[in-house]
Image (tube, helix red, strand yellow):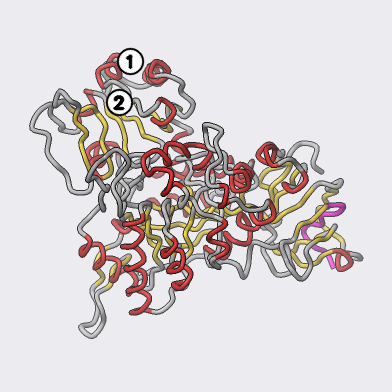
Amino acid sequence: MKVDLIVRNARIDTRDERRPSASALAVLHGRVVALDEEVEGLTARETLDAKGLALLPGFNDVHAHSVWFGTTLMEADLSGVASLDDIYDRIEAQAAGTKPGEWVVGAGYNPVLLQGAVPDRDALDRASGGRPVWIKHASGHSGQASSAGLAAAGVADRDVPELDGGKIVVGRDGRPTGVLEERAMALVQEILLPYPLASLEQALELATAQYAREGITSVTDAGVAGGWIGHAPAELAAYQAARDAGRLRTRMQVMPVMDALHELPGHDDEPARRGFGAGMRTGWGDEWLQLGPVKVFTDGSILGRTAHMREEYEHCPGYHGYLQDDPEAMRTRIRETAAAGWALALHAVGDAALDFALDAIEEATRANGWPPVPNRVEHGMVVRPDQLERLARLGVACVVQPSFITAFGEGIRGPVGKRRGEMSIRARSQLDAGIPLAFSSDRPVAPGAPLLGIQSFVRRISEEGLVYGEHERISVDEAVHAATVGSSEVTGQQAQKGRLAPGQLADMVLLEAHPREVDSAEIGAIPVRATIAGGRFTHRDADVA
């Protein structure tokens, strides 16, 4: 029998309890078909001598923003700035290649790096030569405009309106600072959007090429085609075109944003439904491109103090953040979406928002049963003990981002305080409660390399070098499991990915060392020597043959 690929002399971590390790593996038609002695006697179109390197199932990031990340690779990079002057210099450099009157866009700015400082709107005007400027904050829940940008968006220097689910931030002098929170960002985005589909395809190619270099073989894009996080109403078409043209290097599960759905006419005896016109729903697609749950934003972020908390924020008497829309209106839309067969992915950062999200999911499940892909909660930054029990009872995963700890852990702990900080970005508690634990990054909000995420799961060291919730640490083996098997479970794909066993997809990453073999502080530095998706190399070092 001739197969497509045989890998020999590897130290294979299969993640399969029935056969935890192996040294050889065969692939046919994109799936694993044999291990060890079963490989003997087979011939292959291609053979790889792993020379003792570690081979693991491919990593699966279950919450990232691929188009957003890809576009940041084409914009001014503000992710590592050390001062406001750095920002002005990079905006000036970006403006040099931008036509007069066109927008200068910067991405990745994390105000936590500069103790919450935001650029001066007038200084941005000078740096850009009078061009309108839009800076995307790393959290994704706020942005910064220059004076010219505010003017283009119709924001005056007086009589600043109040907005539902968002805020135009005003300084002590009563003048807008240029910061737009949550739904207020739409004032600028309505000008910049939609992006050309060709640009989105390029963004996907750039993003997935980087994913492959990091050992990622599957990604869930957490919100496309609408809202403040989408880039074009036809964003899914860009995914299809990129896939058809061979520009996608990872498997993609795509979450449409609730705003992209609309009411579906139906029979009088049927419940009200919300979805796409053709009636597509969660699960449509194939092993390379699939529709996932619907993404619903219920609140904002702790970094921006827009997450909805049961108790007030530290040093903000009476302030609890807010939900992004009227609760009853959101419940109605969620109920109609579930009735159309969609799974739910509810963004809920604060614990009050999590209460709302779990109520909505429980109501939807009671009325419609289990969806084709598991319901889930995104982020769950502060999760009370009673909420852990409820998550387990409802069978709902809480998708956390371990790299948030190393990127801005103290920026989270500060607004919520020490006690609530101990209940944030839970990992050990989720496993102990019987809740599937997955790896996700929320990239480009935080660094997305999965080995860094595994390291953060294990060490839990904040950006200031402080331990962040020692009681929530997990072992290296548990962290690797989260990035492979746990991620496949949360996305409803455990029947075909997450393990290297016969019948599973041949998605693999070849590492210089297994994460358990190095000091925990060095996990993120392990070289990724090759990445294979469906038996095909998506990344390969020159000496891997």
Write down the region rendered in magenta: 1-10
Q: Nearer the viewer, residue 15 or 55?
A: 15
Residue 237 seen: no
Magenta includes 7? yes
Q: CA distance from mark 1 to mark 2?
A: 9 Å
The quadrant where residue 25 appears: bottom right
State whether the magenta stretch is mostly helix, strand or loop.
Answer: strand
User: How many discs appear?
Assistant: 2
| Percent x, y of residue 405 | 51, 42
First along the sequence among labels 1 and 2: 1
Q: Nearer the viewer, residue 101 or 398?
A: 398
Q: Residue at image x 25%, y 62%?
A: 330
The answer to whether mark 1 and mark 2 are in CB contact below 8 A is yes
Residue 247 seen: yes
Q: Residue at image x 45%, y 57%?
A: 254
Q: Residue at image x 26%, y 24%?
A: 146
Question: Which residue in the rendered view is the most extreme toward the right?
Answer: 41
Residue 46 left/right relative to 491: right
Q: Nearer the viewer, residue 167 or 155?
A: 167
| Percent x, y of residue 282 | 43, 67
Label 2 element class:
strand
| Percent x, y of residue 70 | 48, 39
How packed mark 1 is, by other alpha carbons closer than 10 Å (few <14, some 14-19, many 20 or more), is many
- Circle 1 sits on which residue? 127
Label 1 element class:
helix
- Circle 2 sits on which residue? 133
Residue 36, numbered label = none
